[in-house]
Image: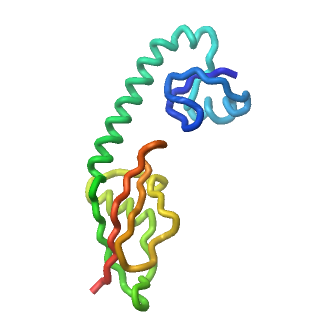
Amino acid sequence: MEVILRKDIPKLGKAGDVVKVKDGYARNYLIPKGLAILANQKTLKALENQRKIILAKAERERKKLESLAEKLEGITLTVYRKIIEEDRIFGSVSSVDIVNMLKEQGIEIEKSQVQLDEPIKKLGIFEVPIKLSSDKTINIKVEVLEEK
């Protein structure tokens, strides 16, 4: 089945591309989620107009991601936690904590964008990757200090 992609999909194509996919993938995932539309005679004729709209939207999203990347560049978040023993902290610093701290600084991201393998449970400075898009990841620093 041929579909026209409405958004960039990793390993499949960019917005506006006509791609051939399995019928079930198109019917059950791409089309219901609004990621693609069916490529038939009518939509192929309208593709050129749609392509301009899709590409303009993709460009706006790219600019938005670039401005977000500029805001995130060089950010260091400082967290204060109580210590249990030596450098182990009581509780942990999770993705939700990082999202909330960024929100306090006026930067809106989703929890799923924080690529933290496991919660931070020690004192120190940690590099936390923030995935902005399929091909753009920015590292921010999270400094965990002892609460006085």
**Quick one: 37 or 127, which is closer to the camera?**
127
User: Which image quarter: residue 84?
Assistant: bottom left
**Could you tell me residue 12's position as x and y percent?**
59, 32
Q: How is the image coloured?
A: rainbow
**Could you tell me residue 111's position as x and y percent?**
45, 56
Residue at the image position 44 percent from the left and 50 percent from the top = 131
Residue at the image position 42 percent from the left and 71 percent from the top = 93
Instruction: Work out which residue is located at the far bottom of the displayed protein and give it.
Output: 85
**Could you tell me residue 125's position as x and y percent?**
35, 72
Quick check: 33 left or right of 140?
A: right
- Name the quadrant of the C terminus: bottom left
Instruction: Say how many tags the image has.
Output: 0
Vertical arrangement, residue 88 with respect to residue 128, above or below: below
- Name the quadrant of the N terminus: top right
**Could you tell me residue 121's position as x and y percent?**
45, 77
Quick check: 19 left or right of 93?
A: right
User: Which image quarter: residue 88?
Assistant: bottom left
**Quick one: 84 or 100, which is closer to the camera?**
84
Vertical arrangement, residue 40 with respect to residue 30, above or below: above
Residue at the image position 50 percent from the left and 33 percent from the top = 8
Vertical arrangement, residue 72 with respect to residue 147, above or below: above
Residue at the image position 39 percent from the left and 28 percent from the top = 57
